[in-house]
Image: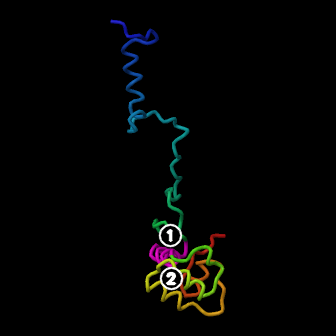
């Protein structure tokens, strides 16, 4: 029977196929080169982690919880970029034009008068809410 491959014997072909089986199927069993494997921690050293220190794993920026991020996002969803910088009355008009719910309009009404806000985060902070902290 002609196999069409004169480089290897059938046994060697089967061995080669078995060696790359894990790589092809994405399962274990591939031949990783030893120098590419992570070196284990030394005595008294902490285990390596993919999560940075101080990160709760929620994806929220440092200084805020995931719930606070969601509330700020909901607040800013109804304020167009074209309304910024703007004062309380301008933000209120823009939010009304975007059919903001009553609770968002009530938050905007709590903003101080006579102050121009450059960003949604500035307005959010003026309401007494937290924003992310810098990691410098």
Q: Residue at x 57, y 90 (%)?
A: 111
Secondary element at image label 2 = helix
Q: Residue at x 53, y 52 (%)?
A: 42
Q: Residue at x 46, y 72 (%)?
A: 66
User: Which comes before the other along the chain, label 2 or label 1?
Assistant: 1
Density class for disc 1 (Cα within 10 Å; few <14, some 14-19, many ≥20) is some
Secondary element at image label 1 = loop
* In the foreground, 126 or 36: 126
**In the image, residue 99 lies at what x, y percent?**
47, 79
Q: Which residues are magenta?
A: 62-77
Query: How many marks are shown on the rendered structure?
Result: 2
- Dominant secondary structure of the residues highlighted in magenta in the image: helix
Q: Is residue 133 left or right of residue 56?
A: right
Quick check: 58 above or below 68? above
Marks 2 and 1 sit apart, C-alpha to C-alpha, by: 28 Å
**In the image, residue 19 lies at what x, y percent?**
41, 27
Q: Is residue 11 left or right of residue 113?
A: left
Density class for disc 2 (Cα within 10 Å; few <14, some 14-19, many ≥20) is some
Between disc 2 and disc 1, the foreground one is: 2
**In the image, residue 117 lies at what x, y percent?**
64, 83
Query: Which dot marks residue 96?
Result: 2
Picture quadrant of residue 121: bottom right
Q: Residue at x 47, y 83 (%)?
A: 104
Q: How is the image coloured?
A: rainbow
Q: Is residue 12 left or right of residue 54?
A: left
Picture quadrant of residue 30: top left
Picture quadrant of residue 35: top right
- Residue under label 1: 60
Query: Which dot marks residue 82?
Result: none
Q: Is residue 100 covered in magenta?
A: no
Q: Residue furthest front?
A: 97
Q: Is residue 70 covered in magenta?
A: yes
């Amino acid at each position: 029977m002609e196999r069409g491959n004169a480089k290897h014997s059938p046994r060697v072909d089967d061995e080669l196929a078995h060696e790359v089986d894990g790589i092809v199927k994405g399962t274990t069993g591939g031949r990783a080169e030893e120098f590419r494997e992570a070196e284990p921690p030394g005595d008294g050293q902490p285990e390596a982690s993919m999560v940075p220190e101080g990160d709760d794993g929620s994806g929220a920026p440092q200084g805020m919880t995931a719930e606070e991020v969601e509330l700020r996002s909901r607040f800013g969803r109804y304020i167009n970029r074209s309304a910024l910088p703007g004062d309380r009355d301008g933000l209120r008009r823009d939010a009304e034009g975007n059919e903001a719910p009553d609770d968002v309009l009530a938050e905007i009404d709590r903003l101080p008068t006579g102050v121009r806000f450059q960003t949604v985060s500035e307005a959010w902070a003026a309401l007494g809410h937290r924003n992310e902290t810098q990691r410098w």
